[in-house]
């Protein structure tokens, strides 16, 4: 695998800073296309395309992280926790992960997307619909036994202490014995 040789001369701190710049650039590109569609054809059309993109992108991201982390096919909640903590936007958002038994709780404490929209005087991104697809498909790509449900996400906020909150449950498959 080839790499950018310019990276060889950077310190660890510079590489971490560069990773944050890349993550911000990725998020900016995501927001720019979305706002372009939103401005031209409205929120409903932008949301349709957002869902379609995340159906595919989230699986690609999950599978690449799964390979990078050397996770097994059924990585469980520990594997999901590791993968969630390395998602591209984990570098620029403030999140929390907590595992209790067969449940993982994921909270996005501060979200750059909502913060930017608020700063620009725009309505919040109604991300619940997209989040259900994004987080559900990501979790299933890590371990197909994991289900995802929304706890709180705009426009259905039930927890004012965070931008969104998700619950992942590891469904143990029945083992049939003969």
Image (cartoon, rainbow, N blue to C red):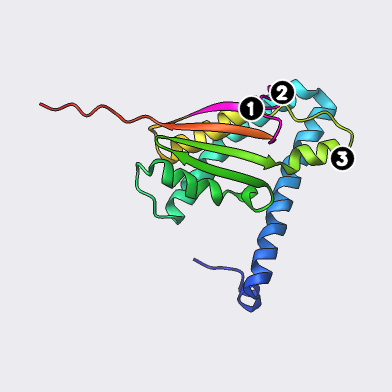
Q: CA distance from mark 2 to mark 1?
A: 9 Å
**Residue at 62% across, 49% down:** 90
Residue 158 is inside the magenta segment: yes
**Residue at 65% across, 53% down:** 91
Query: From the viewer's perspective, is 37 left or right of 147?
Result: right
Q: Residue furthest right?
A: 121
Q: Residue furthest bottom?
A: 9
**Residue at 35% across, 43% down:** 73
In the figure, 22 relative to 29: above or below? Answer: below
Q: Which residues are magenta?
A: 148-161
Query: From the viewer's perspective, is 67 left or right of 52?
Result: left
Q: CA distance from mark 3 to mark 2?
A: 18 Å
Among numbered discs 3 and 2, the one appearing first in the sequence: 3
Q: CA distance from mark 1 to mark 3?
A: 22 Å
In the figure, 3 relative to 146: above or below? Answer: below
**Residue marked by disc 2:** 155
At which x and y percent is residue 26?
70, 49
**Mark 1 element type:** strand
Query: How many discs appear?
Result: 3
Among numbered discs 1 and 3, the one appearing first in the sequence: 3
**Mark 2 element type:** loop
**Mark 3 element type:** helix
In the figure, 91 relative to 151: above or below? Answer: below
**Residue marked by disc 3:** 119
Q: Is any atom of residue 166 visible in this view?
A: yes
Which mark is nearer the camera, 2 or 1? 1
Q: Which mark is residue 152?
A: 1
Q: Which mark is residue 17?
A: none
């Amino acid at each position: 695998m080839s790499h950018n040789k310019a990276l060889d001369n950077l310190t660890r701190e510079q590489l971490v800073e560069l990773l944050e710049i890349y993550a911000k650039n990725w998020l900016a590109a995501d927001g720019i296309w979305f706002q372009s569609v939103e401005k031209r054809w409205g929120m409903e059309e932008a949301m349709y395309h957002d869902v379609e993109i995340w159906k595919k992108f989230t699986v690609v991201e999950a599978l690449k992280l799964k390979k990078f982390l050397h996770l097994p096919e059924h990585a469980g909640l520990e594997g999901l926790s590791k993968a969630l903590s390395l998602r591209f936007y984990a570098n620029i958002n403030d999140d929390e992960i907590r595992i209790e038994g067969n449940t993982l709780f994921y909270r996005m404490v501060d979200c750059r997307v909502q913060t930017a929209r608020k700063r620009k005087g725009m309505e919040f991104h109604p991300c619940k619909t997209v989040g259900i697809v994004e987080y559900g498909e990501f979790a299933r790509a890590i371990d197909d036994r994991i289900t995802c449900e929304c706890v709180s996400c705009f426009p259905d906020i039930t927890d004012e202490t965070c931008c969104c909150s998700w619950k992942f449950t590891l469904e143990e498959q029945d083992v049939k014995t003969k």
